[in-house]
Amino acid sequence: MQNFLASIKIPVNESLFLKDPSTSELGQKIVDGSIELMNQLGFERFTFKKLATEIQTTEASVYRYFESKHKLLLYLINWYWGCIATRIALETKNIELPEQKLKKTIHILTALPNPETDSLISNELALKEIIINESAKVLITKDVDEENKVGVFSVYKALVSNVAAIINEVNSDYIYPNMLASSMIEGSNQQRFFAAHLPRLTNVKDDSDFVESFYTDIIFKTLTK
Amino acid sequence: MQNFLASIKIPVNESLFLKDPSTSELGQKIVDGSIELMNQLGFERFTFKKLATEIQTTEASVYRYFESKHKLLLYLINWYWGCIATRIALETKNIELPEQKLKKTIHILTALPNPETDSLISNELALKEIIINESAKVLITKDVDEENKVGVFSVYKALVSNVAAIINEVNSDYIYPNMLASSMIEGSNQQRFFAAHLPRLTNVKDDSDFVESFYTDIIFKTLTK
DNA sequence: CAAATGTAATAGTAATACTATTAAGTTTGT
DNA sequence: ACAAACTTAATAGTATTACTATTACATTTG
């Protein structure tokens, strides 16, 4: 399995690690292993001790890289959104029509990635599942304000800004572009969680991508003057 | 301060408590106190020991009523959605026009409650803040499936179903009514959190209710044939 | 008024997030 | 070449906290 940190360089806020995990073999094993294990166990059941056992190192060595499992998860999330922002930039830069650009953006943000064609990284699907299942646990916290101060969410805020700009290219009069962007990004992940566990909260029909269809429909109808 | 459990009887799933807190004075103090304290401290920092100190009882006594703080939060959430479902039923039953009915429903679900006029309970605002800040922590979990089995989410699912039905009264052809309902309910709370902590993810203008306006606009444009 | 039941207090245990200290290996300057 | 300096990792903890077992007291009921 190819190492995902090696494949592309995404800058991650320095306050999220003690030692940059992309600079050593152990660091990369910690990141790769935590994606796998956190996805398996969920954030609560995931511990540094279990991770250490899994990748054959010690708990203390993991603490050399990450101050806490909270910050480790923030690191993964940051890294993920950095990748998505890069994908949107790359895959829309040659599209002229604002409508087509928005359609592509909605696709990237709401559809499940195809590991064959879409992925910048090897385990993007596992990472996306972590985003779906665990994001809220580090975002919706009493510590948001302090973490926001040191720039932990700047990647994410920039992404929402960019999507909002694409929305305004389609309709410059629309007054809630950031809300539309953030509610699509967060909502699409949540709808996927619901589809898997509480399907009565959704309208899952077949294996076609209903989440993408739902948001494409809503957004274009909302922006039509 | 009037006791909120006494004011209206909302049935809550029995698997959520060991002893029904509405049947004793201590039980009511536990519920009232936990709303106050959990809102102050947040779910992580909130402990049964701190609660016990606050309401002048013991940790063990709290464990008589609730198996864990996880289930206590689920109890509060269930009770809250029971209240909201009751409000929707009461406040829309005399409305004939489907559009007006939906407008009222969106208002109840997305606007901040006015304690003077809207509230069935004394501390609804504190409880709503808990819903906004802590819901995801017990909903988005590896245990959802088991908890779903014993009926913990039936109140919530019924609420989404009802709102979906109101949506289909406006446009019977719309094929994603449940997704539209659940994404509004969850999204409006999330947007409020963003507005308070990460305003760049939203479009907060003034003190008018932008969350309600945003969802009213989106939903009616989506349902227009 | 005694048996049964409800309520609460004491004093724990187990798990886990996190730290202090020490040991081993690697690099660098002269 | 080799000692000093620094990087990396292992051991063995501590502190917190969620949760439990047991006992004591109070209240209700036949």
Image (cartoon, coloured by chain):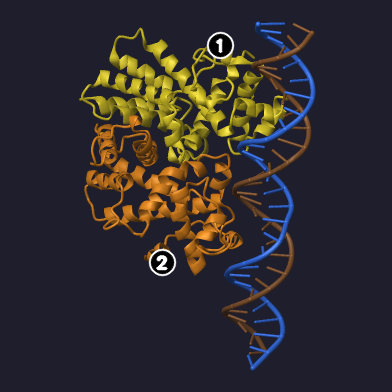
Chain colours: A orange, B yellow, C brown, D blue
The x, y position of residue B214, in whole percent, is: 37, 29
Q: Are marks 2 and 1 in contact (CB under 8 Å)?
A: no
- Residue at position x 32%, y 52% from top? A88
Q: Secondary structure at mark 2?
A: helix
The x, y position of residue B147, in whole percent, is: 46, 32
Q: How far apart are labels 2 and 1 at the CA level?
A: 61 Å
Marks counted in the figure total 2
Residue where numbered disc 1 is placed: B7
Q: Secondary structure at mark 1?
A: helix
The x, y position of residue B184, in whole percent, is: 38, 29
Which three-letter amino acid code belongs to the residue tagged 1?
Ser
Q: Is residue B24 visible?
A: yes
Q: Is residue B203 visible?
A: no
Do callouts 2 and 1 point to residues on the same chain?
A: no
Residue where numbered disc 2 is placed: A6
Mark 2 nearby-residue class (10 Å; few <14, some 14–19, many ≥20): few
**Chain for mark 2?**
A
Q: Is residue B32 left or right of residue A91?
A: right
- Residue at position x 49%, y 14% from top? B118
Q: Is residue B57 left or right of residue A116?
A: right
Depicted B210 relative to depicted A37: above or below: above
The x, y position of residue C19, in whole percent, is: 69, 56
- The quadrant in which the N terminus of chain B is found is top right
- The quadrant in which the C terminus of chain B is found is top left
Which three-letter amino acid code belongs to the residue tagged 2?
Ala
The one nearer the camera, A7 or B27, is B27
Question: Which disc number belongs to residue B118?
Answer: none
Please identify, in this view, whether the residue under mark 2 or under mark 1 is nearer the observer.
1
